[in-house]
Image: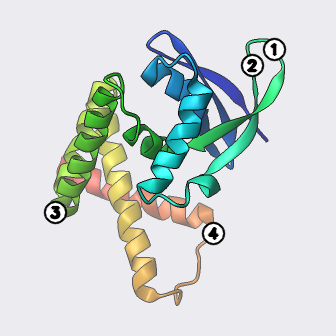
Amino acid sequence: MSTFKLSVFKGKNIRRIIHKNEWWFSVIDVIELLTDSGRPRKYWSDLKKKIQEEGYEQLSEKIGQLKLEASDGKKYATDCANTETMFRIVQSISSPKAEPFKRWLAKVGYERIQEIDDPELGTKRTRALYKAKGYPEDWIEIRMRGIAIREDLTDEWQNREGKLQVMPEKNLRKRLERRLLVEKTISI
């Protein structure tokens, strides 16, 4: 099942659709936005060759022809890419308008590498993100504990390598709720 939506970025529409349970974006729309090219289809044709010359040989496998609504109201097969592939495409666009986006990608990549070296940074960023979105402190605390408990439980299952029988969801939920209650009581 596909869901079609428009995303508005800097006043321009980017067509997107849910495909294989993730968002896929119109490559032409993104190229038009980031290049101001009068011929975005030609730009995309040339860019595909450039990307393959750069060594990204899987590009054709990562692009899907999905039917998106055009300005005339009809649906046409359009080259689309998921978020990961779209990020790769943007990296190859030579345009001053693409540069801020490339810097943002580099920053996010750098932060992820920092989190690999120091996982606590990821936790701090998650807390800051929830706070910036306006979630209350008590909600953030419960959410972060829930994440930690889920990680502990997953680690335990992996340590036992399938020897543990899977608990019915009802029992698992009760166990997690008890653990949260105990932890909250201890922290008070």
- Residue under label 2, please give it: 70
Check residue 43 in the rendering and tell me which mark sits there, or answer none: none
How crowded pointer 4 is (Cα within 10 Å; few <14, some 14-19, many 20+) is rated as: few
Q: Quadrant of residue 60?
A: bottom right
Q: On screen, 171 above or below 84? A: below
- Residue under label 4, please give it: 168
Q: Earlier in the sequence, mark 1 or mark 3?
A: 1
Name the kind of residue labelled 4 in the image. Pro
Q: Earlier in the sequence, mark 4 or mark 1?
A: 1
Q: Nearer the viewer, mark 4 or mark 2?
A: 2
- Residue under label 1, please give it: 73
Q: Nearer the viewer, residue 74 or 162?
A: 74
Decide: marks 2, 1 in contact (CB < 8 A)?
yes
Q: Nearer the viewer, residue 32 or 147?
A: 32
How crowded pointer 2 is (Cα within 10 Å; few <14, some 14-19, many 20+) is rated as: few
The residue at 49%/9% (across/down) is: 11
Q: On screen, 158 above or below 24? A: below
Residue 95 drawn at (x, y percent): 35, 27
Residue 167 drawn at (x, y percent): 58, 73
Residue 92 drawn at (x, y percent): 40, 41
Residue 19 drawn at (x, y percent): 69, 44
Image position of 11 (left or right of 167) = left
Distance from Cα at disc 1 to Cα at disc 3: 50 Å
Decide: marks 1, 3 in contact (CB < 8 A)?
no
Q: Quadrant of the N terminus?
A: top right
Distance from Cα at disc 3 to Cα at disc 2: 46 Å
Distance from Cα at disc 2 to Cα at disc 1: 5 Å
Decide: marks 4, 1 in contact (CB < 8 A)?
no
Distance from Cα at disc 4 to Cα at disc 3: 36 Å
Q: Earlier in the sequence, mark 4 or mark 3?
A: 3
- Residue under label 3, please give it: 117
Q: On screen, 117 above or below 38? A: below
